[in-house]
């Protein structure tokens, strides 16, 4: 019986590291882990709060790009009050300021 539980834990850990390694915000993987081994899920949630200096720098840069893009889009919204145009403007401004992708 213990051996089966051990394999479930290992499978959950492999699933977590493979999926969350690619995308640390993957909620589906976290939900699976919560069901399989709640203590390990709790540990993963705590570890997600720890950021490397490079991660912090990237987060600050992303926030700065988004802030600038939104400010320019708000100015643009008085002239063109259409949601599709504003969405395109935000994406355009983010990309022009160096964003690699949206979302």
Image (cartoon, rainbow, N blue to C red):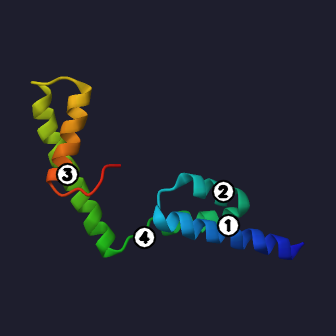
Q: Residue at x 50, y 69 (%)?
A: 47
| Residue 97, image quadrant | bottom left
Q: Which label sits in the foreground, 4 or 2?
A: 2
Q: Position of residue 13 (x, y in %)?
A: 64, 70
Q: How far apart in space, not on screen, are marks 1 and 3 (Cα)?
A: 37 Å
Q: Is 41 or 28 nearer to us in this picture?
A: 28
Of marks 1 and 3, which one's residue comes earlier in the chain?
A: 1
Q: Which mark is residue 95?
A: 3
Of marks 4 and 1, which one's residue comes earlier in the chain?
A: 1
According to the picture, the residue beneath numbered tag 4 turns out to be 50
According to the picture, the residue beneath numbered tag 1 turns out to be 12
Q: Which mark is residue 32?
A: 2
Q: Residue at x 86, y 75 (%)?
A: 2
Q: Residues within 10 Å of mark 1 (few under 14, many from 20)?
A: many
Q: Which label sits in the foreground, 2 or 3?
A: 3
Asked whether the residues under the numbered discs 1 and 3 touch, taking CB atoms below 8 Å apart as contact, a structural biologist would say: no
Q: Which label sits in the foreground, 1 or 3?
A: 3
Q: Is residue 85 above or below residue 35?
A: above
């Amino acid at each position: 019986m213990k051996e089966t539980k051990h394999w479930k834990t290992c499978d959950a850990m492999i699933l977590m590291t493979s999926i969350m390694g690619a995308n640390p915000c993957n909620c589906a993987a976290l939900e699976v882990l919560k069901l399989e081994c709640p203590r390990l899920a709790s540990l993963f949630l705590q570890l997600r709060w720890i950021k490397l200096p490079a991660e912090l720098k990237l987060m600050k840069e992303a926030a700065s790009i988004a802030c600038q893009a939104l400010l320019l889009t708000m100015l643009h919204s008085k002239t063109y009050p259409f949601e599709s145009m504003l969405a395109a403007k935000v994406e355009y401004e983010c990309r022009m300021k160096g964003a690699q992708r949206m979302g």
